[in-house]
Image (tube, rainbow, N blue to C red):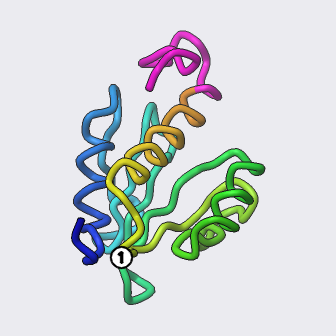
Amino acid sequence: MSTAALDLHACATARAAELPGAMLTHPFGPDWDVFKVRGKVFLLLTTVTGSQQAILKVEPLDGEALRSEYSFITPGYHMNKRHWVSVYPDAKLTPQLLAELVTDSYRLVVEKLPRSQRPIDPSTFG
């Protein structure tokens, strides 16, 4: 395996684009790619801090575990620090881990939608 960091934005965008009902929006301007499902944010991508980052929703305990295990995962930039994490490029970040984080964030957002608006069943998806 290469020691070069993967293209975080390309990998996260590819996974988000596969998710049912996901839409790319730019509510904060061209420097932010914001993926939503039924109008609710599940992924933000930006380079405003000088480096690529993906901001994803997490369960609070999962967020704590991820931050303690991976140096490239930090509290969510400009978001609720318990419920969101920022992921940065790193040689140890695998496409599988990033895809799993994007999927989990999507599923957490879908769980909060009224049943009639859910594009998937969050208990069985992914």
- Specify the farthest residue to the top: 116
Which sits in the foreground, 8 or 21? Answer: 8
Which sits in the foreground, 103 or 112? Answer: 103
Q: Residue at x 44, y 46 (%)?
A: 102
Give residue 9's position: percent from left, percent from top.
29, 64
Give residue 76's position: percent from left, percent from top.
61, 67
Q: Is residue 45 above or below residue 90?
A: above
- Specify the farthest residue to the front: 1
Q: Secondary structure at mark 1?
A: loop
The kind of secondary structure the magenta stretch mainly shows is: loop
Give residue 29's position: percent from left, percent from top.
34, 69
Which sits in the foreground, 10 or 94? Answer: 94
Q: Is residue 65 above or below residue 3?
A: above
Give residue 72's position: percent from left, percent from top.
52, 74
Amino acid found under the numbered disc labelled 1: Gln
Q: Residue at x 37, y 84 (%)?
A: 51
- Asked if residue 45 lies left or right of residue 30, the reply is right
Magenta stretch in the rendered image: 111-126
Q: What crowding class fits label 1: few (fewer than 14 Cα within 10 Å), some (14-19), or many (20 or more)?
A: some
- Asked if residue 41 lies left or right of residue 17, the reply is right
Q: Residue at x 36, y 74 (%)?
A: 91
Q: Residue at x 45, y 86 (%)?
A: 49
Q: Quadrant of the C terminus?
A: top left
The answer to if 112 sits in the magenta stretch is yes
